[in-house]
Amino acid sequence: MTNKYFQLKITTDKQVNDLVVGFLSNVGAEGFIEESSELSCYFAEGKWDPELKTDVTKFLESLRAEGKIDKFSVDVSVVKNQDWNRQWEESIVPIDVTKTVAIKPSWKEYSGDARIVIEIDPKMSFGTGHHETTRMMVQLLEKFVRGGERVLDIGTGTGVLAIAAIKLGAGSCVALDNDGWSIDNARENIEKNDVADKVKLLSGEIAAAAEKKFDIIMANLNRNTLLYIKSEISDRCRKGGYLLVAGVLTLDEKDIIDVYDQVGFKLEEVIREAEWSAFAFSK
């Protein structure tokens, strides 16, 4: 085990941690620690490449050009090996997402009043309910799931939204992801929450789902992906169905609303938290 790690610390004036994690997740980072608008990424000595600082700087410059951030800094330092997983586990606590739904890690006890308690063991801090986009999607699910719906979850991650949909009364859910790590993590969580008989977990894009039409489609993704797959989403949502969307910065609201209007969706509701927006559309 290496005794030396490189810490890439990224500080921005607005929280764009999930965008940065998405950018760095496939280049060898062994852990992430989030603190609001500060994100620390850790690389073992053998996986560190000095060009990573240049690459992430260019990425942040592109976010600034798009208006998503105004200021940022990128710092590199060398730190001694620590138990990153233990530190991260200690930082994750149970959270009431709504009055009805709470999300907890298996290593913590929940003592609140929520009727539905979802147990999630994530390998990173997304999908634990601590991120605004996850919370807003659960809030929308609570409002639009009335019972028995066929649900499609695009980019399921930890599987938390698929699990929430079933716990709230949906009849079935097809959960998709194109990342093998996410599929493994989602499978563990789906089984842990006893919904494996109602959630079909698939690796791949929307085309992997054999079902032609869904009553509710969930897409907690980023702006560019949402714009790119708009027609595929429209094709799979039945007339009278709903599309629930998150992962969009407030400054990108108009782009998403306008484009989805063009493919047959009517905006029903917008909710906001911090700099993030979530939408409910009807077809």
Image (tube, helix red, strand yellow):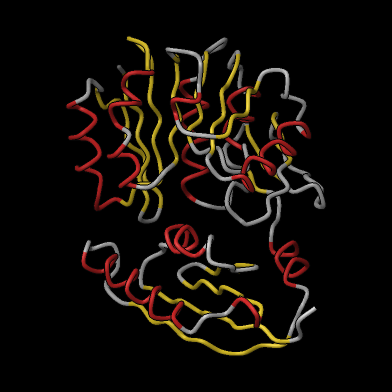
Between 146 and 195, the one lying in front of the other is 195
40 is higher (above) or lower (below) than 264: below
Task: Locate residue 161, reporting x and y percent.
Answer: 57, 34
The number of numbered discs placed on residues in the rendered structure image is 0
- Side of 68 where 220 appears, left or right: right
Which quadrant holds the C terminus?
top left
Q: Which quadrant holds residue 282?
A: top left
Task: Locate residue 193, reporting x and y percent.
Answer: 75, 31
- Side of 164 where 146 appears, left or right: left
Task: Locate residue 221, reporting x and y percent.
Answer: 42, 43
Task: Locate residue 207, reporting x and y percent.
Answer: 44, 25
Which quadrant holds the N terminus?
bottom right
92 is higher (above) or lower (below) than 179: below
For image coordinates 40% across by 50% down, the residue present is 273
- Side of 74 where 189 appears, left or right: right
For image coordinates 72% across by 24% down, the residue present is 195
For image coordinates 24% across by 22% down, the residue present is 266
101 is higher (above) or lower (below) than 251: above
For image coordinates 41% across by 64% down, the residue present is 15
